Amino acid sequence: MYNRYLSVYKKHYPVKKLAPVLALIIALSPFAIDMYLPAIPTMAAFFSVDIHLIELSIPLYLIGVVLPCCITAHVCTDFFCTLIRFLSVQLKKLKNETFN
């Protein structure tokens, strides 16, 4: 089942295309807030609302940036912890076989 999932994943999300896209998303995120903050007065005038209403969108943006990072960090941590446990067990077995 895992092989089937992996083949579908590789078909639809080739690493050569996915890695640059993810790198751009991560690299451009700070520029987005840097462009957004100076535009707040202009947006408030364009939408004819108080500037404080536009400022309420900043926490939503930050939540949108931080939440995916928290989710992916948890997934990556689980994966790498499992990998490290596996490698440590394999190294222990190799050490026992070598010195016994």
Image (tube, helix red, strand yellow):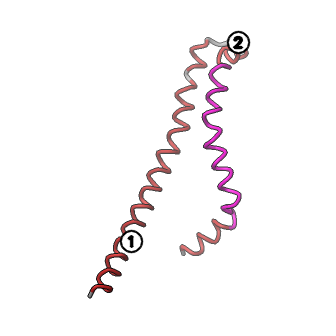
- Real-space Cα separation, disc 1 to disc 2, in angstroms: 58 Å
The relative height of residue 91 versus residue 66 in the rendered view (above or below) is below
- The residue tagged 2 is 45
The residue located at (70%, 15%) in the rendering is 42
Q: Position of residue 7 (x, y in %)?
A: 63, 72
Residue closest to the eye, 30 or 98: 98
Quarter of the picture containing the N terminus is: bottom right
Dot 2: within a 10 Å radius of its alpha carbon, few (fewer than 14), some, or many (20 or more) residues? few
Foreground: 8 or 76?
76
Q: Earlier in the sequence, mark 1 or mark 2?
A: 2
Q: Amino acid at mark 1?
A: Phe
The kind of residue on which mark 2 rests is Ala
Residue farthest along the front direction in this orientation: 99
- The answer to which image quadrant residue 61 occupies is top right
The residue indicated by pointer 1 is 86
Q: Is residue 3 magenta?
A: no
In this view, which residue lies farthest toward the right? 46
Q: Main SS type for the magenta part?
A: helix
Figure disc tally: 2
Name the front one of labels 1 and 2: 1
The magenta segment is 11-39
Write the residue at 47% across / 45% down.
Answer: 70
Task: Classify 59 as above or below 68.
Answer: above
Name the side, left or right, on which 30 lies relative to 77: right
